[in-house]
Amino acid sequence: MPSTTPDLIPHFGHADPEKQLEYNLPSTPFVDETARTSDYEFQLSKRRQTFGGGSRDNINSSRAPTGRKQEIQHDFRYLSTIAALQNGGLPGLFWSMIICYIGQLFIILSLAEMSSMVPAAGGQYNWVHAFAPRRYKEILSYCAGWLCSIGWQARFSALCYVIAGLILAMAELNHDDFHGTFWQRGLLTIATAIFVSAFNAFAAGHISIAEGFFALCHVFALVPIVVSLWILVPKKSARAVFLNFQDHKGDWPNVGLSTLVGQSSAMFVVLGSDAVTYIAEEIDNPELLVPQTMLRSFLINVPITLIMLVTYVFNVGDVEEILRGTVPPFVSVLSNAFKNVAATTGFSVVILCLLIMVATSTMVSTSRQLYAFGRDKGLFYSSMLSRVHQKLKVPLNAILSTTFFTTVITVLTLFSQTALRTMVSLCIVCLMATYMTSLICLIMQRLNHVQLPAAKWSLGRAGLTINIIALVYAAWAVFWSFWPSFYHVTGANFVWAILLFVFVLALALVTFFAGRRRQSQERARRVSAGFRLRV
């Protein structure tokens, strides 16, 4: 029985609406290997209208699913830095961030070019299918889709967990007799996910206003915080900040290894600029706009992050005391600077609002990626995930499924000391693995001198070199993300991301081969039935 959901119809380079377009779908066990359409523009405009977007005939009406064109994956970069401080100290935090920004830049450049070649909402699994050898297209694109979905789900869960920790920190700051517990943070994480989901579902048309306000806060909140810290807090020496590497409580054999283990915080912070990929089918001229926006969002955040980073490492105070505390490091820094509960709480509330908007933007990308993969029948209950609510004009089931995932992973890590580290590592590993798969396939095409799809945004002759550097960094990130923060591993401080990653990959493979077998059986039954009718 044919599916009632629209087929994914990404296009290569310059689509010609006057010509029939044929495109091999990123095959999954639940989708026919090929799909045809005789009117690409009509199908794509229908898909844009599903989310309330525009058409190519009216470029001014082009907006993202929430009624706006997403220009920046805003990330205020205040996420937890405990891992980096503990493993490597202040120099470890600073240099890890610099290295990760440089490495991630090569990944963003590579992803930007691929998004121009194949501007489809599926992102990595579409790119893998476009560039992989024919023999491995199905299985590689299917696994890439699963890992990408889990990676973005884990990113949203981690953001909700950080927000919950900040709320508890403000409660502890204002009530000396209150001490947050694991179960309280877990409940707040789930409550945060529900709130963000409700905002995405029922106030999607107002996200543009909220992001405009957020963009102003992003800039204007920076100035008073930076000025206050430089004026009020005693400064550390340049040697202590840039050269005095330390291992705080990690008990690693040497400081160098400890510093490498602590890179996960920086790796997580620099992720997310490729989020615009997942709304490629809902904006005009995606071959050019998506890569430009992707690179712009990354570069805009670099100077802001570096300003905050330098301010932070010079004014952080006693690192040992911060690590002994129960509140996030930046709250301790603000408290030491202002010596006033009300002022610290006020700035913390501003940061809380910014983090909520980061989570909101992440939910948009996460739900759209889940919707796209569900539309291609790549997940369980795909027909449910690929539905768009008729009145709200959002993929409501995908949003609710994201909330459910956050609830499940929060419950699984409820009493773990490394709950946040597990979510962060799972996000890094899954997304970097999809980047690696896409890059390997693209590099093979370049080395074999295969004609690549036309791209309005191209890396030119530097493409192969940039792709190789990006692949090396992605592999580096995957390797170190599995490492625990402590040398002596126990059940309490074990990073469960490696087990979750293996489980997800195994589940994807089992589902793939089970689905392929089911398809073969259905074809055999149809052939047998046809033979009996002829006889």
Image: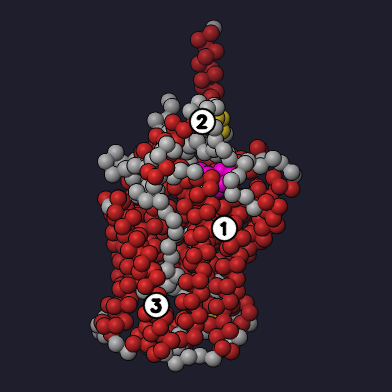
* Left or right of 25 in this view: 464: right
Query: In the displayed structure, would residue 290 be above or below residue 263?
Result: above
CA–CA distance in space, label 2 to label 1: 30 Å
Q: Earlier in the sequence, mark 1 or mark 3?
A: 1
Residue at horizontal 31%, vertical 57%?
209
Residue identified by numbered label 2: 17
Q: Does the magenta stretch include residue 207?
A: no
Q: Earlier in the sequence, mark 2 or mark 3?
A: 2
Q: Which amino acid does label 1 sit on?
A: Ile
Q: Residue 315 carries which label?
A: none
Q: What element carries label 2?
A: loop
Structural crowding at the residue carrying mark 1, measured as other residues with C-alpha within 10 Å and reported as few (<14), some (14–19) or many (≥20): many
Q: Where is residue 214 in the image (x, y as percent from the top left)?
A: 35, 64
Q: What residue type is labelled 3?
A: Val
Q: Where is residue 346 in the image (x, y as percent from the top left)?
A: 29, 78
Residue at horizontal 63%, vertical 59%?
470
* Residue 255 sits in quarter: bottom right
Residue identified by numbered label 1: 108
Q: Give the range drawn in magenta.
A: 115-121
Structural crowding at the residue carrying mark 2, measured as other residues with C-alpha within 10 Å and reported as few (<14), some (14–19) or many (≥20): few
Residue at horizontal 30%, vertical 50%?
205
Q: Is mark 1 on a helix, strand or loop?
A: helix
